[in-house]
């Protein structure tokens, strides 16, 4: 039996704690959590990650999570490898429920609300924020002014590929291209 480590930014909310009125909480990643998230997401630094979260019951077995988060981070430029600072502020909504309710939930909520299967007796609002943060990170960060010279290499009929193609053409009796 293998144990999985707890997520780096875990904030569990027990389902038994949720009543009819929404549960609200502000969460902020500690320095140690930010260091762990930096490694997880391949960042150079994560200077801040905080969120305001609201979790509300939607019937007996469904829970709606609404969150707004903001973060400041540093990534590596894909061209120069120089540090590139970034900041994001985003909002998201997730609907949690038993896995067998996913089809039914999809018919009753808007397209922009993703369904998350509910496993266990708690919802990890910190991990939900961390996952959404990872989705909005720039995939190809670039330093201002960083460019890639996209100049085509000169045509070279003497390279190994040209020689191999020439031999293949000779075998078939075709003129080389």
Image (cartoon, grey):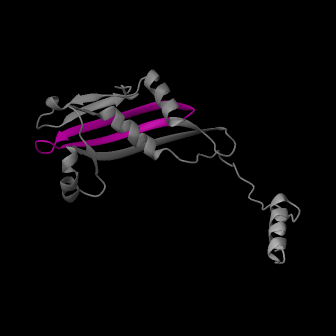
Residue at the front extreme of this rendering: 171
* Residue 78, quarter of the rendered image: top right
Could you tell me residue 156's position as x and y percent?
86, 63
Q: Position of residue 42 (x, y in %)?
A: 54, 35
- The magenta stretch spans which residues? 43-72
Residue occupying image coordinates x 38% and y 25%: 5
Q: Considering depth in this image, is 45 or 89 the residue closer to the camera?
A: 45
Q: Nearer the viewer, residue 26 or 175?
A: 175
- Looking at the image, is 40 positioned above or below residue 143? above
Residue 140, image x, y percentages: 58, 48
| Residue 156 highlighted magenta (yes or no) | no
Residue extending farthest to the bottom is 174
Residue at left offset 24%, top offset 37%: 119
For this view, does 138 lie left or right of residue 131? right
Instruction: Report whether 57 appears left or right of 9.
Output: left
Q: Is residue 53 magenta?
A: yes
**Residue 17 x/y as whole percent:** 16, 29
């Amino acid at each position: 039996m293998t144990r999985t480590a707890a997520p780096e930014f875990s904030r569990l909310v027990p389902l038994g704690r949720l009543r009819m009125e929404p549960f609200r909480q502000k969460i902020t990643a500690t320095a140690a959590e930010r260091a762990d998230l930096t490694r997880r997401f391949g960042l150079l630094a994560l200077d801040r990650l905080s969120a305001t979260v609201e979790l509300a019951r939607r019937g007996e077995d469904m829970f709606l999570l609404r969150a707004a988060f903001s973060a400041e981070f540093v990534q590596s430029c894909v061209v120069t490898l120089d540090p590139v600072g970034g900041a994001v502020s985003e909002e998201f909504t997730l609907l949690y429920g038993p896995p067998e309710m996913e089809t039914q939930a999809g018919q009753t909520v808007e397209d922009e609300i993703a369904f998350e299967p509910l496993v266990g007796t708690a919802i990890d609002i910190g991990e939900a924020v961390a996952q959404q943060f990872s989705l909005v990170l720039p995939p190809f960060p670039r330093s201002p002014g960083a460019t890639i010279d996209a100049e085509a290499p000169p045509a070279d009929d003497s390279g190994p590929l040209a020689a191999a193609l020439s031999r293949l053409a000779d075998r078939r009796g075709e003129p080389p291209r």
